[in-house]
Image (spheres, rainbow, N blue to C red):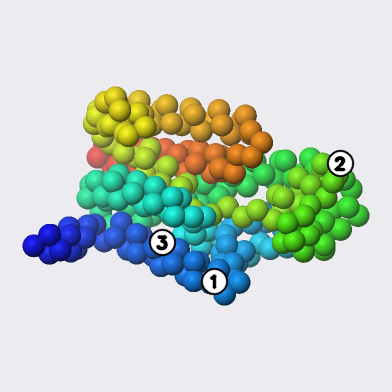
Amino acid sequence: MSGFQQRSAFGNMPIIVKNLLIINGLFFLATLAMEQQGMYLSRLLGAFYFDSPLFRPWQIVTHMFMHANFMHIFFNMFALWMFGTAIEQVWGAQRFLIYYLITGFGAFILHYTIVSIEAQNMISELGPEAVERIKTEGIALWQEGKNYTDPAMNRLNALYNIPVVGASGAVFGILLAFGMMFPNTKMIFIFFPVPIKAKYFVMMYGAFELYSGIANRPGDNVAHFAHLGGMLFGFILIKYWNNKHNASREY
């Protein structure tokens, strides 16, 4: 009986949320399987900085379905299921998918806008010869677990060789949409066992991500500005849809 109920619950899940869970799961399983063969899909499907020799156009899309480890995909997919289900039920499949993809693209855009500013500062400091040296030999050096001793070359090589992976940008966009659509819904989390309205949780989380992104603590491998990009593009898109809807009604 319990097995039937589980299948029924999965079958009743909104179609886009369900298929996104399946696709992300398949990408993660493929990543694990390929790693056993010594092949790393994150180097092909993760999103690299556009000036990196490793950048490929399809990574703008594929990075949203790649994850670094089990906890990374678990929390992203749990949030997608928990918040995305309610949103897709209100918006419908087409609008939800558009929103998911645009917030994912927005995360990519804001993250690499910030990376580009940092990279250009490094490039102007190093000069063209050093930059070309990094592009030609830096990948092999990085894959050996090594890097340059010069701080600027070290940092630029890291920017060229560390891909962004994960659905977090789109998930943060979904979190923002939930806070705007269901602002007074009270939420309780294991790490914060006090009831808090969704709108306040979203504002607090956004402020934390902004602080973390600006602080840029050493060893922090979280793309905080990607999270903010998902929220920013989500906010703009929701406002655009609302204004368009109100304009249609007035007409």
Q: Quadrant of residue 203?
A: top left
The first of marks 1 and 3 along the sequence is 3
User: Quick one: label 2 or label 1, which is nearer the N terminus?
Assistant: 1
Badge 3: few (under 14), some or many (20 or more) residues near its Cα, within 10 Å? Answer: many
* Amino acid tagged 3: Asn
Q: Is residue 187 above or below residue 53?
A: above
Question: Compared with residue 82, is residue 62 higher up or lower down, i.e. above or below?
Answer: below
Q: Residue furthest bottom?
A: 37
**Mark 1: few, some, or many residues within 10 Å (few <14, many ≥20)?**
few
Circle on res. 36: 1
Q: Is residue 99 left or right of residue 32?
A: left
Of marks 2 and 1, the one in the foreground:
1
Q: Neighbour class for label 2 at 10 Å: few (<14), some, many (≥20)?
A: few
Give how far apart the Cα atoms at labels 2 and 1 are.
Answer: 40 Å
Query: Helix, strand, or loop for circle 2?
Result: helix
Rendered-image quadrant of the C terminus: top left
Residue 123 in view (yes/no): no
| Residue type at the position of mark 2 | Glu
Q: CA distance from mark 1 to mark 3?
A: 19 Å
User: In which quadrant of the rendered view does residue 38 lie?
Assistant: bottom right
Tell me whether the residue at label 2 lies in contact with that at label 3, contact meaning CB atoms closer than 8 angstroms: no
Q: CA distance from mark 2 to mark 3?
A: 40 Å
Q: Which residue is mark 2?
A: 125
Q: Nearer the viewer, mark 1 or mark 3?
A: 1
Q: Are marks 2 and 1 in contact (CB under 8 Å)?
A: no
What residue sits 36% from the left and 56% below the top? 97
Identify the image quadrant of residue 36: bottom right
Residue 34 in the figure: left or right of residue 217: left
Check contact, mark 1 vs mark 3: CB within 8 A. Answer: no
The residue beneath circle 3 is 24
